[in-house]
Amino acid sequence: MTKRFKVSLITATLAMAAFNSSAAVEIYENDGMSFSADGLVNVFYVNSSVEATDASGNVSDRDQSRVRMGFLPNNIGFNFSNQLSDLKIGMRSSFWVSINDTDQSRDATPGDLGTGSLIDVRQFYGTVSGDWGEVLLGKDFGLFNRANILGDELLLGYGQTSDFFGLVDGGNVSFGNISTGYTYPFPKSQITYRSPDMNGFKLAVGIMDPNKTGSDSSEDLPRFEAELMYTTTIDETSIKAWVSGVSQSSEANGVEQDQSGIGYGANVKFGGLSLTASGFSSEGLGHVAGLDNIVGDDAIESDGYLVQASYTMEDNRFVVTYGETEVKNTGSVLDATHTNTGVAYFRTIRPGLTLVLEYNNTEADVSDSLMAEDNNTFAIGSVITF
C-alpha cells in the first residue's frame, strides 16, 4: 500500500435520490404518468491548516485556501414513472459534476491549464413495483453502509479533508465522514428487491457486479448486499434502526479470499433533537469505498463508528459529530487510525437555499510510515436545491 492515498472518482458522492427527489420539480403529470427533475449546486470557501509528521520525524505545515464544492457533488437528476394497472414502472438518471477542477486538466496534474469537470453518471436504473414490493434494475448506490452515509448530519456540509487522502487540493469532493466512521456505498450494477413495509420493517436484498481483485481474478458468484430497516414512532419520538451487510468471494493466482462486512446504526428524534450512532466492520474491503479487495495474507480489516447530535430550532440546525475508523493489515505492520471531530451550523434562508458554517479537525496516524497528520478545516458556503 502507498503511504499517501490519492482518491478522486471514489468520492463523487451522494445526494442520492433520497435527498433530491424530495425537492423535485414536476414537469409533466397526467393519467398516472409523471416526469420530474431535481438538482443541487453547492460551493464553499475553505481554509485548511495542516501539520504533518513524516517517517523521519520532520514536521511540515501548510495553509491552503480554496473555493470548492462540499461533500455532495453538484448534480441534476431526472425521474419518470408510469402506472400500468397494478404495476408501476419508473426510471431515474442522475449526472454528477465537479467544480473542483479550476487548476487541473483531465490528467489531474496541478498547475495544468484547462478543466475536467468529471461528468459522471452515478444512477441510471429502472424500477418495477407493486403491492409485493419493488425490483430495481441498473446502476445505483450499494446497500452496505448506505443508511450510515444517508444519515450523516454533514451530508449537506463539508466534512473531513485529510491531506493523507489528497483531499485538500483534490479534484473532487470532500469526504464527509468517509473513512472516519463509514465506507462509501459505491454505485454498482445491480438487481435489487425491496419489500413493502412490514409492520415498520423494510428489507432490501441485491446481487451486484463483483469488485474485481485484478483483471485475471475469478468470481464464481456475484456480490451480495442487503439492508434491513426498521422505523416506528412512539408518542412524539421517531426511531429508526438498520443493519446492512455485504459478501463476496474472489480467487486470484490460486489464492481465495472472502470479503465481508456489516453496517449498523440507529437514530432517535424527539422535539428538535436528533441523536445518531452508527458503525461498521469489514474484512478484505477497503475502508474508503469498500472496493479494495485483497487476496491472500494481506487482508485488510476495518472497524469504524460515528456518533452525532443535532438540534433544529425553526430554520436553524446545529450539529456536533465525531467519527473514527481503525484499519489493520493482517499481513504487514500497517495499522492506521483516522478520526474527525466537527461542529456545523445550517441556516435555511429560504426553501431551497441553505447557508453552512462548519469546522472539522481531522487526524490520521499510520504506523508503517510513522506518518501523522493534524488538519483543521473551516468552511463557509451555501447549498441551492430544486
Image: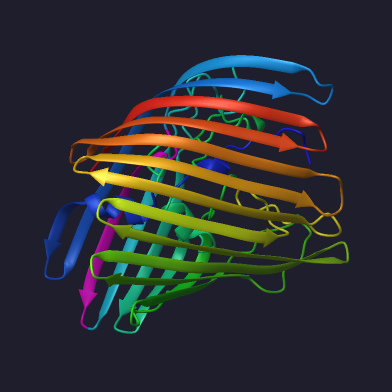
The answer to whether 174 appears left or right of 7 in the picture is left
User: Which residue is more in the foreground, 345 or 80?
Assistant: 345
Residue 158, visible in the rendered structure: no
Q: Is residue 78 magenta?
A: yes
In this view, 207 is above or below 333: below
In this view, 336 is above or below 198: above
Q: Quadrant of residue 237?
A: bottom left
Residue 28, visible in the rendered structure: yes
In this view, 176 is above or below 240: above
Q: Residue at x 64, y 60 (%)?
A: 281
Q: Residue at x 54, y 53 (%)?
A: 186
Residue 135, given in percent of the width and then of the height, sits at 40, 74
Residue 87, given in percent of the width and then of the height, sits at 27, 80
What's drawn in magenta, residue-wise?
70-85
Residue 378, given in percent of the width and then of the height, sits at 45, 24
Q: How is the image coloured?
A: rainbow
Q: Is residue 41 magenta?
A: no
Q: Total number of numbered labels?
A: 0
Residue 78, given in percent of the width and then of the height, sits at 29, 52
- The quarter of the rendered structure image containing the C terminus is top left
